[in-house]
Amino acid sequence: MTTTAKQRPTLSTTTGAAHARIWGVGGYRPERVVTNDEICENIDSSDQWIRERSGIITRRQAAPAETVVDMASAAALEALKAAGLTASQIDTVIVATVTHPYQTPGAAPMVADRIGATPAAAFDISAACAGYCHGIALANDMVRCGSSQYVLVVGVEKLSDFTDKTDRGSAFIFGDGAGAAIVGPSDFPGISPTVWGSDGSKWETISQRNSWIEVRDHNVEWPAITMAGQSVFRWAVYSMAPIAQAALDRAGIKADDLDVFIPHQANMRIIDALIKQLKLPEHITVARDIADTGNTSAASIPLATQRMLDSGEAPHGGLALQIAFGAGLVYAAQVIVLP
Ligand code: UT7
């Protein structure tokens, strides 16, 4: 015998804003500056090699007691101030991080509570260095579909907790910090369609060394993040330029229309190679925050954005292409109107 559903009522749905934009950005850089010479106390390397191969001169390191939630909250409060909003206006908090040291709960509910955004929806996303651009993509869609009016997106990392100080391939590259943006309604398109994707076949090229199960059952070393640097370098240089170009195409603009290029701060040589491959005109200002911030993974793009806006290097209301890539491997790129 078959049964048929009873007359089904139509569900109500939401309608969002016509467009979304970034209302404000904020950043937090820990106080302690770590030089290349200090890094070289634990690895066979030199200040000159690190500068030449990565472009990094110094990076910041969080204090031992300073947490991902502390740094994220500081950046979030700055972003709120820049946006001219209060925490109670935030409907959703998205925290992009791979260094919150709790498997559960996520950092986002704690950040929401800390800044006074409760009962905002709050969740973490794990998209490594591309986490912030994934968050901006989600926030854009949420505002436009009506599930949120204002979304706080934070990229935050305390990589010093997950870096092996004696690993020559990664010890010099990572830094700590947090960057945040508020996405809200707009009467013009302020965030272009995102071009994003993944290649999980390359997951081992950047990964924590051991799974938590291996740590528990086999007494292996702390699961620091390690990287097959050269493979990731090649992938970033050759595969990410077409993604950046695709983001420009999806935005309906040409490279010449850009004011600023804000790539993930992974390595100065990757930044230079992307500029060359994209044939970026010289008038475009390029983020080079990596020199004294290091590679802060999910925090790198919002930190660079905040610095460029604050210093006047990037014009308020200008167009910026941002592209991020990292562990997964995953990537995301979009054009934004700077707040
Ligand atoms: O943020 C997420 C995505 N991450 C990235 O995009 C990072 C991508 N990778 C990189 O940025 C670069 O691969 C690194 C900066 C990590 C390394 O630079 P590289 O130019 O790719 O170095 P390499 O691994 O090809 O090594 C070149 C040489 C080797 O020596 P030989 O074989 O040429 O004699 C290494 O043994 O440099 C040596 N080397 C070092 N020397 C001094 C490797 N690491 C070091 C070191 N200090 N720390």
Image (cartoon, rainbow, N blue to C red):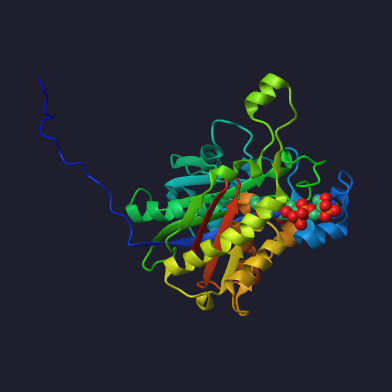
Query: Within the image, what quadrant is residue 137 found in?
Result: bottom left
Query: Is residue 228 depicted above or below 291 in this figure?
Result: above
Residue 229, x across and y down, in percent: 71, 50
Taking 143 as reference, is 128 left or right?
right
Taking 50 as reference, is 148 left or right?
left
Near-viewer residue (183 or 36): 36
Q: Which residue is rendered at x = 89% and y = 46% of the image?
A: 41
Tell me, yes or no, if residue 296 can be seen here. Answer: no
Q: Which residue is rendered at x = 71% and y = 52% of the image?
A: 230
Residue 144, x across and y down, in percent: 35, 56
Query: Within the image, what quadrant is residue 278 found in?
Result: bottom right
Residue 109, x across and y down, in percent: 51, 38
Query: Within the image, what quadrant is residue 313 found in?
Result: bottom right
Taking 269 as reference, is 75 left or right?
left
Tell me, yes or no, if residue 105 can be seen here. Answer: yes
Near-viewer residue (67 or 80): 67
Q: Quadrant of the N terminus?
A: top left
Q: Which residue is rendered at x = 59% and y = 75% of the image?
A: 280
Query: Is residue 107 depicted above or below 139 in this figure?
Result: above
Query: Is residue 119 depicted above or below 40 in this figure?
Result: above
Q: Which residue is rendered at x = 48% and y = 44% of the image?
A: 117
Near-viewer residue (39 or 145): 39
| Tally of numbered discs | 0
